[in-house]
Amino acid sequence: MSKKKVVFVVLSGLVILAGLWMLWPDSTPPIKDDEGNVLPQSITSLEKVQIGGMEQWLLIRGYDKANPVLLWLHGGPGAAQIPIARHFNGELEKDFIVVQWDQRGAGKSNPRNFDEQTMTFSQFVTDTHELT
């Protein structure tokens, strides 16, 4: 298979995954120990919050609520990283409370009536300050 076809297939898959993510349930699985028991000190949450005057989505996961927070800022806008976050960054959850954020215009934070004119550098900075 040529490189162009591989790139096309991969990109198509990511677009489909991002589209399905919009329909995905609003939950995330619990963090369990080796015996399958939920870790009582862990945190797992997928929630929408008001940031910058609009609903935006956060995935919050960590093995221990006492660990420091790591805010993951993806390149955005466009496709979300939340659907693939645990696959690529799951190990970080052992040492941090990882907050994956679908910023305005990305993934679940990209509603049908979204005003793309609000996607300015200044607004992204303001949103980030409000979230932190």
Image (tube, rainbow, N blue to C red):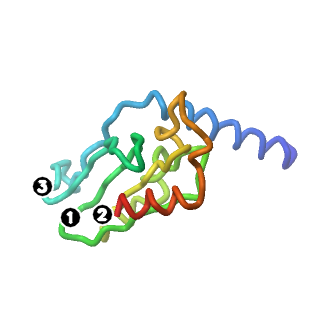
Q: Would you place residue 80 above or below residue 75 in this image?
A: above
**Viewer-closest of 15 and 57:** 57
- Residue under numbered circle 3: 40
Q: Secondary structure at mark 3?
A: loop
Percent position (x, y) of residue 93? 33, 63
Q: Residues within 10 Å of mark 1 (few under 14, many from 20)?
A: some
Percent position (x, y) of residue 118? 56, 46
Q: Are marks 2 and 1 in contact (CB under 8 Å)?
A: yes
Q: Give the CA separation, mark 2 to mark 3.
A: 14 Å
Q: Are marks 2 and 3 in contact (CB under 8 Å)?
A: no
Q: Amino acid at mark 3?
A: Pro
Q: Give the CA separation, mark 3 to mark 1.
A: 8 Å
Q: Amino acid at mark 2?
A: Ile
**Viewer-closest of 12 and 117:** 117
Q: Residue at x 31, y 37 (%)?
A: 27
Q: Amino acid at mark 1?
A: Asp
Q: Quadrant of the N terminus?
A: top right
- Residue under numbered circle 2: 97
- Residue under numbered circle 1: 64
Select label 2 or label 1 by which is in front.
2
Percent position (x, y) of residue 112? 54, 28
Q: Are marks 3 and 1 in contact (CB under 8 Å)?
A: no
Q: Residue at x 70, y 36 (%)?
A: 12
Q: Residues within 10 Å of mark 3 (few under 14, many from 20)?
A: few
